Amino acid sequence: KISFYNGEFKDDEELRVMYQDRAFYFGDGVYEVIRYYDGEFFTLEGHLDRLMNSMSEIEIEGMERTELLDIVTELKERNTIENGALYIQVSRGIQNRNHAYPVDVKPVVLACINEARRPHSQSENGVHVITSEDYRWLKCHVKSLNLLANVMEKERAVKAGAHETVMHRDGVVTEGSSTNVFIVRNGILKTHPADNLILNGITRQEVLRIAGELDVPVEEAGFSVEELMDAEEVIITSTTQEVTPVVKVDDTIIGNGQRGMVTKRIQEVFDANIHKLNLV
Ligand code: PLP
């Protein structure tokens, strides 16, 4: 398998990373996970835009969008994986440990690919989630390498035999540890507004767009944990989880415990968009 680090494509057996990379010392960087299906990138532009935006938010300078596009394109071509999730991170650079931003260093890119399968079974049967307090920082719109809270909250779900942890701040549902969260209540599709308290998921944006196409009423507004429990349908979304129905929240069964109709209709269009990629 071929990966990319600090300007070079290398076989994983030979790839060496620098321990002075600020990604290790400080988590000082940002990242994206980009899906491709049968060799074709899905929503690539959205991911590159967000990566540029994340860099700008944490004041990483000196990395062009075209450079990133070239790296992800070449990395996909150099590997033989047909269906993959491409991980790309940009750190502030390599220098001896010092909190202050280094001067005269270039940002460092790490990129790799892992095989990924579509989550067909969970898309159909749904998953269980648990809830917990959102104690993360106030720049959750930045896709930062600092994922300690997300990792610990995901592990809490794993220990509870659940799939994901849905977080809430002051009683308002924000997002999952690595997913955005939607509910359907009184026929209205609701999700937290894209402010500093959530990551504006690319899949979230796709789902909102699809809902518009389907004439499903949409509200980007906060909703409470009580509303979540009482929803007709609950959905979590992400690049790798796609559009996944939630059938149980803590001990509460959602709807009739099966994927809802709004979820199914959105999934059908999402699916069709993936299939369209390879019809050219
Ligand atoms: N929220 C968080 C905290 C995430 O880490 C992710 C993705 O990993 C998402 C939401 C979903 O974003 P996307 O749909 O762009 O993958």
Image (cartoon, grey):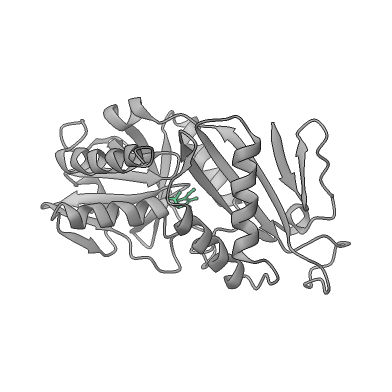
What residue is at 77 percent from the left and 58 percent from the top? 22
What residue is at 70 percent from the left and 70 percent from the top? 62
In the foreground, 34 or 97: 34
What residue is at 45 percent from the left and 58 percent from the top? 46
Furthest residue in direction left, as rendered: 186
- Residue 121, given in percent of the width and then of the height, sits at 34, 25
In the foreground, 153 or 279: 279
Q: Please indicate, yes or no, whether residue 145 appears anywhere in the rendered image.
A: no
- Residue 58, given in percent of the width and then of the height, sits at 62, 70
Seen in the image, is 207 located left or right of residue 147? left
The C terminus: image quadrant:
top left
In the foreground, 178 or 210: 210
In the foreground, 91 or 155: 91
The image quadrant of residue 267 is: top left
Seen in the image, is 201 located left or right of residue 95? left
Give the number of callouts.
0
The image quadrant of residue 106 is: bottom right
Furthest residue in direction front, as rendered: 280
What residue is at 28 percent from the left and 27 percent from the top? 125
Q: Is residue 16 above or below residue 186?
A: above
- Residue 86, given in percent of the width and then of the height, sits at 57, 42
- Residue 258, given in percent of the width and then of the height, sits at 20, 30
The N terminus: image quadrant:
top right
Q: Please indicate, yes or no, whether residue 75 appears anywhere in the rendered image.
A: yes
Seen in the image, is 27 located left or right of residue 31? right
Furthest residue in direction right, as rendered: 96
